[in-house]
Amino acid sequence: MEITDVDRPRKKMSRIRRACDTCNVKRTKCDGNDPCSHCSRMNLTCTYLRKEKKRGRASDKYPKDIKKRKSKGASSTGSSAPLVQNNVEDTQSTPDKWSDNNVTKSAGNTPLSHLADNVRFTNYRPVDVVSSVPHSIEHRPQRAPLVPQVPLPQPIISPEPITTPALSPMGISQLLSSIGSIMNPVYPVTPAADTSRYPLMLTIENDLRTLGIPLTVADELLEFYFGENDRPCTNVFSILRPSAVLSGKRPLHPTLLLTILTASTMHIDHWFFLGSRRKITYQMMYHMIQDRLPRDPYRLSYDELIAVIHVCYFQPWLSYPKDSVQWWRLACDTVRILMRQPPLSPDEEFKEEQLRAWWAVYILDRITSFSFNMPLLMEDTELFEVYMPCDELFWIKSADAPIAPEMDSNRRRFVDYNHDVARGIYGWFLPLAGLMAKLDEYKRAESSPRQLQSIIFAQHGILQHKILEMEKSFEGQTLLPNSDAESFMIDLLYAKYINLAIGFITQYIHSHAIISEFEDDMANDGYERLVSCVEVLEQILKLEPEMKRYPFLAGSFLFTTGYAVLQIINDVDHAHPTKINKFKYLVNTLVCVFEAVFIQFPAEFMRTLRNLLVRSLQDCEKLILLTDHMEQFKINAQKRKQALSAYSWLPETGQGLAV
């Protein structure tokens, strides 16, 4: 008699650890086949796409097993085990994260028989390995990738391998000490190898020795600062000309040179600055700079002024953003004094450098005043007779002397400037800086604010029209190389975003506070401006995923954009799936931008706003799924509003982003 599939007894199903996606969701017993029997019976799609999560905890017997292995290893090694342990403690005393793993850690936690397999010390000279490594290997540090790997020195290979019985206890001690010195990232170099390619490094040679930075590494820091494609995000003003500094034509004050190296130390990916060494090094460098810079503007030299501009800009990386206020005031007071003096040199290149320094302080004044809700220190009238800087591409990549601004028909004074948008920080942000001065005046005006508002909107419209014209002309431009064209496009997008943000802020200033009582009506013109801001941010993120070009300049305006989105979400009074789905686009884009900028500019307000945006979106999704979540949503919205109330632009009590 033939037995059919129906008559055949069915195998009992049981859950396994690796179930298919469908059985995992439905909590159905799964046999783990592809396809599984459950999905085959039910005609379901059987997939194994999800990532498995690690669950469970270590057994209670696990520490006991380690103790047993340790005691067993100690009994097998006899009296030599304490000697090994003492040496390991010496090698682990250095504050280096490399000594926490790999060789030294395995040497301290394993018996001597296992040490031979881990260290492979048969290829080392046990006595003279420390003295031989520095004089036999020339260390040439290379710029590390995003995930740096330390090129460890290769050991001296003995012509005849040394066997284990030939090592005395003293030899083992010296061997472990040598291993600790090799794992130390402070690689010693010979005096012949530790020479600089730039003579100006000799002016701070003693400081570099105090910091423990070899001259070869200092050369790489200087080259990284003036790099074309990859440079520190604190070098945004491009005051110094790379060709003049690197060729030795432009001597630098020791304090200014130390400031340049500090800016590079904070951002370079280099094997020398692994672990906590980076932070320790640039904090030591900052204390040196802080002690040497005079606080009297009449005693501050021109080179020291450039150093102050740098310190004011990278101060948020060192402590808190508002700590830069003292340097900001010092820079503005010093510029007024130096502008009244004759040029320090008749050279046109140096005169151009001075122009860029004056405008750098002007830009810094605008962004610092807006960020911390403080009055401007420099008026536009103080720079009416100052010429605009030359082309950014010519200044950075060429070594030719610039034409005197009086002889160049394309150069205008600030009073005659028609707010054209060009490449570089001075080309795209100076028109916006003038607009920000009007915004500050409008915030603090006690009478006739409508007239000021109309002036701001008029300038905003002119700038928006010029930016769109530049974008159209850029589409058909084929003369520039791809890298320069892409860089110019990124500058235009930053200008477009900040211009939209200024117009958006101006439209919703009430009672001298920024972004208050914003309406969540999607047909409102303000909502369209907000969506336009986020769309431009998305374009910037596609062209520059790391957002490392202008993180500090864009940070304040990013906050106002996220602030407005949070206000819309907090005012939601019912579950509206269409509206909430539109919020998802705004929140997800802003979260990606905040996370990218936070890596370059680790400010606390960035972290706070990013977390609030994520939680608000989670609340909205629960509002759709759960019918009784409205009450909890209002409680959470009130908490978010309370957290945002710390950031205020009120004229007397508001401190802006300085929280």
Image (spheres, grey):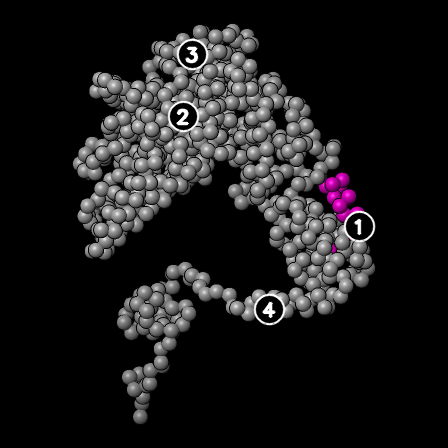
Image mark for residue 65? 4
Between the residue at mark 2 and the residue at mark 1, the CA separation in whole angstroms equals: 59 Å
Going from the N terminus, do you reach mark 2 or mark 1 first? 1
Q: Nearer the viewer, mark 2 or mark 3?
A: 2
Q: Amino acid at mark 4?
A: Asp
Residue in the image at 25% along x and 51% along y = 632
**Residue 485 is inside the magenta segment:** no
Going from the N terminus, do you reach mark 3 or mark 4 first? 4
Q: Amino acid at mark 3?
A: Tyr
Residue identifier under label 1: 127
Between the residue at mark 3 and the residue at mark 4, the CA separation in whole angstroms equals: 77 Å
Between the residue at mark 4 and the residue at mark 2, the CA separation in whole angstroms equals: 59 Å
SS under mark 1:
loop
Residue identifier under label 2: 368
Q: Nearer the viewer, mark 3 or mark 1?
A: 1
Residue range highlighted in magenta = 121-137
Q: Are marks 4 and 2 in contact (CB under 8 Å)?
A: no
Tell me if 617 is positioned left or right of 63 in this view.
left
Going from the N terminus, do you reach mark 3 or mark 1 first? 1
Tell me if 193 is positioned left or right of 623 in this view.
right
Q: Amino acid at mark 2?
A: Thr
